[in-house]
Amino acid sequence: MNILLCCAAGMSTSLLVTKMEAAAKLEGIEAKIWAVSANEVKNHLDDADVLLVGPQVRYLLPQLKKTGEEKGIPVDAINPVHYGMCNGAEVLKFAKNLIGS
Amino acid sequence: MAKFTQMLEEKVMPVAGKIAGQKHLQALRDGLILTMPLIIVGSIFLILGFIPIDSYPQFMADTFGADWLTKLLYPVNATFDIMALIAGFGIAYRLAEHYKVDPLNAGAVSVAAFILSTPYFTLFTPEGADAAIQVGGVLPMAFLGSKGLFVAIIIALFSTEIYRWVIQKNIVIKMPDGVPPSVSKSFVALFPAFLVILVVWVIRLLIEKTSFETLHNVVGKLLQEPLGALGGTLVGGLIAVLLIQLLWSTGLHGASIVGGVMGPIWLAATDANRLALQAGKEMPEVITQQFIDIFIYMGGSGATFAFAIMMLLFARSQHAKQLGRLSIGPGIFNINEPITFGAPVVMNPLLLMPFILAPLALVVTTYIGMTTGFAPKTSGIAIPWTTPPIIGGYLATGGNWRGAAMQLINLAVSFAIYYPFFKMWDKQNYETEKSAAN
């Protein structure tokens, strides 16, 4: 499972990446999770199964959803509270549901 | 207060979304970023050139020769002084990406168009002469740097618009039968670049007929100078910071959105101070990129470093204790999404008060500090916005302890503003937790 995260500079989402990796390990899920800045997303999208967008850049969501649709990759914004508390397990679940749907 | 947050969500949010998603502003923001790594590297050499120790210049001259400073500043000139060239390429590249036309070509064409709008001579006053003489065969470095930044931005957007328009029009040249199709294609491929150069060339010829003489003078007098003057005032700084905070209040990345507009102005102000530093003159600008990044947004947008410390040291509720441990690490590097979304501050009237008030207060204190001479102005040294507080203030002012002292004062001011709200918020959490436990 390849999960791509993005925010303005890819910095605060990288916080979440480490928590999600820990959650994935705990659940025994093989996952590649990484964070990039919004303008790098295009270069990474081909490697991803799902794109999660930080709530602070959710204004980019329509644009990114369109790009995702063309490639058949689900795109959605991360729940702000889960994002703030760096709740790796919940965001991982969210990613799994998006891929599954 | 509930009405206020509702207003933010319904009125501010959609407008902010539109502005932030606007492709020219987005290209401007993303393209300008291309200059940052270069400028930060150049700043390392700049810091070494102006370490504020009295015996330092003498020591360096004794060790490396009398022209040590000139040589040390070579990399500074190669990074700061071409920021317009680099920014123009970056902006054209990012805009072309949006239009799905070849970004590399669009970037190259934009660089050519920028040079085309720049004079190929400079004025030079030889020693002992009364009047300046015109020296040909050169590009004035000043125009490739911050002085040409706005021209580069305008040319990048303009040339890329022409470029993609021609391509999307799908112009075809009819060749007689027998001409291989790839030959006609290779002619067509030249057409977008040709039209850009043609249009900019005509513009240059027309402007040369006026008293402005160059596009740089037109843009400088009509756009860059007035905007710079507005952005450099206390009121200008307060308005920009207020907008950033209002956007963050709805959970949108305010600095990134407002930065699209203010970025070039603050960057040009940074460089004005850098040039003054190198020339040994009084620094002209108070409000620069570093003023905002380093002195106002300590701990992240909202000046939340003080709030993170409070949670860590004085929290009673489990929620605040946990958030304090989670947010202090990123907070040291001026990243505060755990606080804005985790506390949460976003859409939370109680915490929005200090979140908006504290940065505005810090603009005032820092502005007063720097204009009265208590604290030095930022000296054009571009350090990353992730530089921790105290170290940041020290470095951004060219290694001056008063810069760090200004940050300590700002920390105290933001602490005083956040504290009462923190106490109320923590108490609410504590009582909710207690009643949940019962």
Image (cartoon, coloured by chain):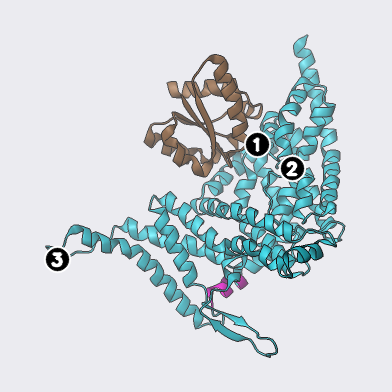
Chain colours: A brown, B cyan
Query: In the drawing, does residue A87 fall left or right of residue B197?
Result: right
Residue B18 placed where, x, y %?
53, 47
User: Distance of mark 1 from mark 2, alpha carbons?
Assistant: 35 Å
Residue A22 placed where, x, y %?
59, 21
Residue B142 placement: quadrant: bottom right
Magenta segment boundaries in residue numbering: B214-221
Discs 3 and 1 share one subunit: yes
Is tag 3's residue or tag 1's residue first in the polypeptide sequence? 1
Q: Which residue is mark 3?
A: B176
> Quick check: is B259 in the magenta stretch?
no
Query: In the drawing, does residue B184 fall left or right of residue B383?
Result: left
Q: Which residue is mark 2?
A: B388
User: Distance of mark 3 from mark 1, alpha carbons?
Assistant: 66 Å
Q: Which residue is mark 1?
A: B6
User: Which amino acid, by three-letter code, is at mark 3?
Assistant: Pro
User: Which amino acid, by three-letter code, is at mark 1?
Assistant: Gln
Q: Residues within 10 Å of mark 3 (few under 14, many from 20)?
A: few
- In this view, the residue farthest toward the left is B178
Q: Residues within 10 Å of mark 1 (few under 14, many from 20)?
A: few
The image's mark for residue B248 is none
Q: Secondary structure at mark 3?
A: loop
* Pick the front one: B261 or B87: B87
Q: Residues within 10 Å of mark 2 (few under 14, many from 20)?
A: some
Q: Give me the chain letter of mark 1.
A: B
User: Which amino acid, by three-letter code, is at mark 2?
Assistant: Pro
Q: Is residue B136 above or below residue A93?
A: below
Q: Secondary structure at mark 2?
A: loop
